[in-house]
Image: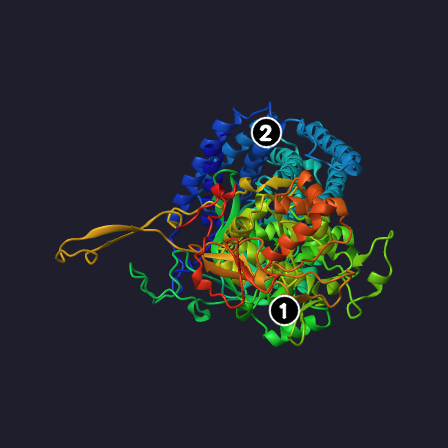
């Protein structure tokens, strides 16, 4: 069946069911007043029913002859949709049925009834042996084969019964065969359904925790499963309906007139049980934190395409209530027919914003904007909201979608906070409870239920406090819940025992790439610096003291404990933060487009976390290089360490405030130009040529690299009517190291310093106009931190390179005859003879500087300057 024909048939069936049951129209959220349902006369209702049935018959008769038997899975799906549509109409037109309401006169009703029976006979002749559903677990393959054999046995007995050559013994055999098939099918549905929902939940968790993960079509396996179950039930139900309406069949062999009707209704109820949990709530699919009064979308899909829906309702329930609902859903699978789930109270209120974007009923949206403010009073918040079903043209299945929902907390913040005080920072967990009103093939209505993925609700006063402790607990709660991934049916259960350090590293890295929206993840080497910093005396528990398989464990309490700290010299007190808050601060660096951090991370220039010893070891083998890396030294920040002329410097960290005012690209460019950097460390831990440093892509309106044109009528002597355009060269603020203050650095004290030896200095950065030449790379430089592990030969080679001396020059200097002469000359040039040297002249103490002309040689051009924009 083409999608168009199938779409038309399902849409017409929906119109028939709405008219038959007099289903009320769901009011639109735009309507400010309650709209009274439109009442139609019986003649108008009869006309609608007649038109719908004629269109259904027209589409079905055309399609039955073109069913695609070469594709078994497609055949089963299309056959099931047609069969259950016809059965749903017949039960409502059958005068012997429970829900018959005589919508037509006797002649019309009999005419439609006979037409539909012909369709059933044609469908029965077009049957095909079903293949097993996709990805049947190995442990259930044998059970599926047994169920299929019961299915064939039931059909064989019905074939004999349909022939009319039957007796009481055959009736008993038919009843036993039908009962055995239903019993086996229900058991298979419970076992396979549980495994199926585990797969669906894993896919949804993967979507929430993996950046760029595409799970389009992840429900195909489930759709195929429900189609196969509906096909096997439909084959038997169609055969029973044909026998029941065969006027030539000897009915005296049955115990009573309703015998076949009762068996048929049993099959209808079984389909209700199977389809009762065939809904899936797609949201939340990206962010598991709902902020009160902030808009979010919702989408609900059906996995059983044979079901027809009247409405979808939605409420928010707590974690405890969700567990109760799941228990009742499981009990329905063991019953003869799905019972109603008990009403439960909502944990938060929901409201629907108008899809037009107008926020208030009295708002006047116009070109100038109008009043469109979000306020709680703008909408009518309810415990339940109802969404009208819509038919998806691509998959030809029913769904409910609405783009503008918002939630409001039902309980006070103090109550929500008190619930989590005993759970080491865990925030309350909520679920969407979905209830759908479904048209039953038996003629009445039943309900289908499902639960969404878990989420947390943050109050509006905390939504802008991403790095504050309260918001940290919201994000950490969702990280831990989705990361540990303890799936119990439709729910994710909380992990109290902890997880291994190796698993935590993996989850921490995935969360980073997901929320920073980068493809490159943190590696195990990047996170090794945190391996011994996950617990302290306050948060260390039994899980930390009893490693499993020799590997330390991490608990949720460890993640939120603020045991990381730093302090500044000459400042009292220290700043503390948790591993999780450090992550959130890093994510702020990546989310702010002004920082350029994301670009340099993806291009491999920015490294992960590195220890100070590792940095010194890497730089000690270079003469002119730079390393840019992430750090928690002052919270989430970016650090740069350079070696220039063999001298290692650790530059002051760049936090969010610094990078917002001056992007990372400018800092790197200034350091490369000022210090004549030749190499940088890339993400493969290899030294790359600094001339190949990538530059961020500038926006279309970014004219900082070109001339700034100003048109004015001022810069000339003519009258005011004459204008002139002048091109101005822009200026920027350049950054250089404060080498003159190097002997008194702005030090960062590590209170829990694990490194022996001197504390590394971090020179501060100062901003100077770029039109001024940078200071000489060797002036005002005190003795730097020297790695004692560096051998003498390497150090000597570095000094030779710095002073431009060859091996012969050094040997000549070390000659005893030349050593005294060189020392004296060196003292003169250093100004140590109580005077100063200017342009090769020695000044006495009483001699004036003004007597000499200063000669400022041009700085030699750096070979890497061409890769950066310079300004005059």
**Residue 311 shows in the view:** no
Q: x, y percentage for residue 328?
A: 70, 58
Q: Is residue 48 above or below residue 75?
A: below
Query: How far apart are the alpha carbons under marks 2 and 1?
Result: 56 Å
Question: Mark 2 vs mark 1: which is more N-terminal?
Answer: 2
Left or right: 75 as drawn, with respect to 392:
right
**Residue 688 shows in the view:** yes
Q: x, y percentage for residue 246?
A: 60, 32
Would you name the residue on which mark 2 appears? 75
Q: Which of marks 2 and 1 is in front?
A: 1
Crowding around mark 1 (Cα neighbors within 10 Å: few <14, some 14 to 19, many 20+) is some
Q: Please, which residue is most extreme toward the front here?
A: 817
Which of the two residues, 388 or 692, is positioned nearer the viewer here?
Answer: 692
Left or right: 813 as drawn, with respect to 216:
right
- Please, what secondary structure does the residue beneath circle 1 have? helix
Q: According to the image, what is the colour scheme of the structure?
A: rainbow
Residue at figure coordinates x 66%, y 49% from the top left: 646
Which of the two residues, 346 or 837, is positioned nearer the viewer here?
Answer: 837
Which of the two residues, 554 or 287, is positioned nearer the viewer here?
Answer: 554
Say which mark, if any, is on residue 469: 1
Left or right: 563 as drawn, with respect to 113:
right
Marks 2 and 1 close (CB-CB < 8 Å): no
Residue at figure coordinates x 38%, y 46% from the top left: 700
Q: x, y percentage for residue 382?
A: 51, 66
Q: x, y percentage for residue 504?
A: 73, 54
Q: In this view, does 741 lie above or below 191?
A: below
Left or right: 564 as drawn, with respect to 711:
right
């Amino acid at each position: 069946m083409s999608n168009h024909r199938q779409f038309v048939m399902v849409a017409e069936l929906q119109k028939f069911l709405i008219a038959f049951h007099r289903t009320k129209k769901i009011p639109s959220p735009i309507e400010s007043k309650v709209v009274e349902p439109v009442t139609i006369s019986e003649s108008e209702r009869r006309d609608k029913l007649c038109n719908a049935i004629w269109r259904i018959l027209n589409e079905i008769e055309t399609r039955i002859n073109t069913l695609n038997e070469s594709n078994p899975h497609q055949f089963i799906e299309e056959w099931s949709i047609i069969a259950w549509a016809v059965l749903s109409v017949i039960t409502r037109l059958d005068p012997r049925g429970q829900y018959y309401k005589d919508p037509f006169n006797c002649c019309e009703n009999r005419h439609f009834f006979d037409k539909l029976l012909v369709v059933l006979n044609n469908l029965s002749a077009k049957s095909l042996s079903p293949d097993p559903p996709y990805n049947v677990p190995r442990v259930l393959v044998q059970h599926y084969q047994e169920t299929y054999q019961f299915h064939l046995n039931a059909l064989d007995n019905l074939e004999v019964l349909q022939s009319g050559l039957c007796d009481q013994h055959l009736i008993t055999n038919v009843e036993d065969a039908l009962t055995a098939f239903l019993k086996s099918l229900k058991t298979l549905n419970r076992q396979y359904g549980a495994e199926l929902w585990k797969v669906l939940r894993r896919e949804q968790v993967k979507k929430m925790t993996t950046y760029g993960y595409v799970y389009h079509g992840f429900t195909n396996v489930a759709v195929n499963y429900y189609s196969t179950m509906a096909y096997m039930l439909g084959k038997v139900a169609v055969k029973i309906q044909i026998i029941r309406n065969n006027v030539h069949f000897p009915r005296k062999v049955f115990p009573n007139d309703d015998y076949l009707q009762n068996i048929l209704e049993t099959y209808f109820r079984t389909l209700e049980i199977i389809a009762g949990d065939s809904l899936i709530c797609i949201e939340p699919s990206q962010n598991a934190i709902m902020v009160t009064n902030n808009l979010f979308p919702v989408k609900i899909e059906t996995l059983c395409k044979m079901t027809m829906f009247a409405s979808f309702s939605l409420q928010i329930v707590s974690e405890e209530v969700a567990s109760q609902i799941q228990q009742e859903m499981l009990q329905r699978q063991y019953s003869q027919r799905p019972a109603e789930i008990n009403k439960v109270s909502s944990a938060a209120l929901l409201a629907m914003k108008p899809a037009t974007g107008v926020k208030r009923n009295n708002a006047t949206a116009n070109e100038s904007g109008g009043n469109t403010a979000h306020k709680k009073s703008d909408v009518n918040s309810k415990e339940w909201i109802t969404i009208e079903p819509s038919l998806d043209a691509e998959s030809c299945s029913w769904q409910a979608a609405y783009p503008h929902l918002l939630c409001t907390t039902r309980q006070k913040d103090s109550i929500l906070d008190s619930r989590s005080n005993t759970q080491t920072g865990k925030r309350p967990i909520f679920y969407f409870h979905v209830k759908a009103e479904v048209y039953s093939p038996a003629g009445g209505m039943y309900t289908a239920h499902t639960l969404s993925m878990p989420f947390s609700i943050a109050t509006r006063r905390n939504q802008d406090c991403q790095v504050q402790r309260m918001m940290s607990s919201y994000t950490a709660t969702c990280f831990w819940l989705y990361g540990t991934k303890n799936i119990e049916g439709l729910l994710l259960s909380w992990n109290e025992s902890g997880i291994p350090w190796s698993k935590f590293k993996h989850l921490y890295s995935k969360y980073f790439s997901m929320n920073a929206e980068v493809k490159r993840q943190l590696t195990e080497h990047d996170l090794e610096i945190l391996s011994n910093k996950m617990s302290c005396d306050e948060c260390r528990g039994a899980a930390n003291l009893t490693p499993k398989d020799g590997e330390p464990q991490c608990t949720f309490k460890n993640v939120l404990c603020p045991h990381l700290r730093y302090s500044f010299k000459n400042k009292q007190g220290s700043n503390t933060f948790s591993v999780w808050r450090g992550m959130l601060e890093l994510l702020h660096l990546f989310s702010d487009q002004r920082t350029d951090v994301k670009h340099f991370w993806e291009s491999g220039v920015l490294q992960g976390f590195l220890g100070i010893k590792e940095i010194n070891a890497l730089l000690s083998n270079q003469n002119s290089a730079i390393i840019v890396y992430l750090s928690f030294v002052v919270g989430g920040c970016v650090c740069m360490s350079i070696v220039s002329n063999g001298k290692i410097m650790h530059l002051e960290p760049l936090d969010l405030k610094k990078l917002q005012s001056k992007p990372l690209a400018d800092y790197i460019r200034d350091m490369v130009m000022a210090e004549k950097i030749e190499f940088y460390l890339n993400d493969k831990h290899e030294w790359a040529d600094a001339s190949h440093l990538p530059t961020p892509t500038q926006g279309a309106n970014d004219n900082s690299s070109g001339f700034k044109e100003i048109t004015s009528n001022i810069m000339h002597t003519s009258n005011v009517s004459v204008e002139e355009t002048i091109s101005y060269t822009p200026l920027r603020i350049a950054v250089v190291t404060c080498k003159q203050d190097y002997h008194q650095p702005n030090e960062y004290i590590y209170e829990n310093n694990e490194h022996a030896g001197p504390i590394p200095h971090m020179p501060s950065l100062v901003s100077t106009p770029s039109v001024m030449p940078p200071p000489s790379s060797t002036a005002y430089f005190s003795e730097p931190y020297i790695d004692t592990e560096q051998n003498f030969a390497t150090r000597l080679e570095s000094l030779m390179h710095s002073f431009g001396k060859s091996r012969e020059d050094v040997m000549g200097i070390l000659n005893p005859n030349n050593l005294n002469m060189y020392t004296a000359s060196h003292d003169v040039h250093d100004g140590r003879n109580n005077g100063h040297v200017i342009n090769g002249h020695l000044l006495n103490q009483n001699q004036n500087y003004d007597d000499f002309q200063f000669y400022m040689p041009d700085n030699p051009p750096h070979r890497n300057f061409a890769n950066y924009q310079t300004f005059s």
